[in-house]
Amino acid sequence: MTEQFFTWGDLATYGGAVMAVLIITEFTKDLPLIRRLPTRLWAYCIALTLLLAAVVFTSDVIYAEDVLLCFVNGVIVAMAAVGSYHSVQEQLN
């Protein structure tokens, strides 16, 4: 990515989605209501929301298969984001 903020096109990519989910999860996971949820579940909720929004804002026509793929891709993005965080934490400890 370049020296700019995220675009919906960036969030529709694997790398952009993983980075955004990692940042948003880390920033929000200690909020009072969110703290009760397992971090992986919260990361999945964020990933799903971002991917669905990216489909809505980058597509002229939204197909059912695109929406269904967001549910699967959300798992992949959330697992990558949580795994990246844990990998960095292990290196720091």
Image: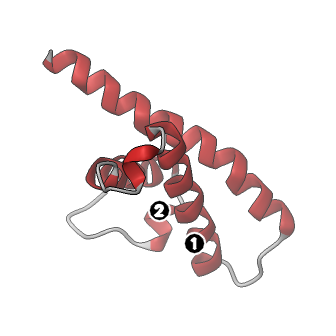
Q: Amino acid at mark 1?
A: Ala
The reply, left or right, for residue 83 in relation to residue 65 is: left
* Mark 1 element type: helix
C-beta proximity under 8 Å, tags 1 and 2 = yes
Q: Amino acid at mark 2?
A: Leu
Residue at 75 percent of width and 63 percent of height? 67
- Seen from the viewer's position, the closer of residues 78 and 13 is 78
Instruction: Work out which residue is located at the far bottom of the displayed protein and give it.
Output: 60
The quarter of the picture where the C terminus appears is top left
The reply, left or right, for residue 8 in relation to residue 67 is: left
Q: Please name which of the two marks, 1 or 2, marks the residue nearer to the observer.
A: 1
User: Is 26 located above or below residue 62 in the figure?
Assistant: above
Residue at 71 percent of width and 84 percent of height? 60
Residue 1 place in picture, x, y as percent: 31, 57
Cα separation between marks 1 and 2:
9 Å
Residue at 29 percent of width and 49 percent of height? 30
In the image, which disc is placed on residue 53? Answer: 1
Residue 73 place in picture, x, y as percent: 65, 47
Give the crowd class for mark 1: few <14, some 14-19, many >=20 residues within 10 Å: some
- Seen from the viewer's position, the closer of residues 31 and 90 is 31
Give the crowd class for mark 2: few <14, some 14-19, many >=20 residues within 10 Å: many
- Seen from the viewer's position, the closer of residues 57 and 29 is 29
Quarter of the image where one finds residue 81: top left
In the image, which disc is placed on residue 83? Answer: none
Residue at 33 percent of width and 25 percent of height? 86
Circle 2 residue: 11
* Mark 2 element type: helix
Residue 69 place in picture, x, y as percent: 75, 53
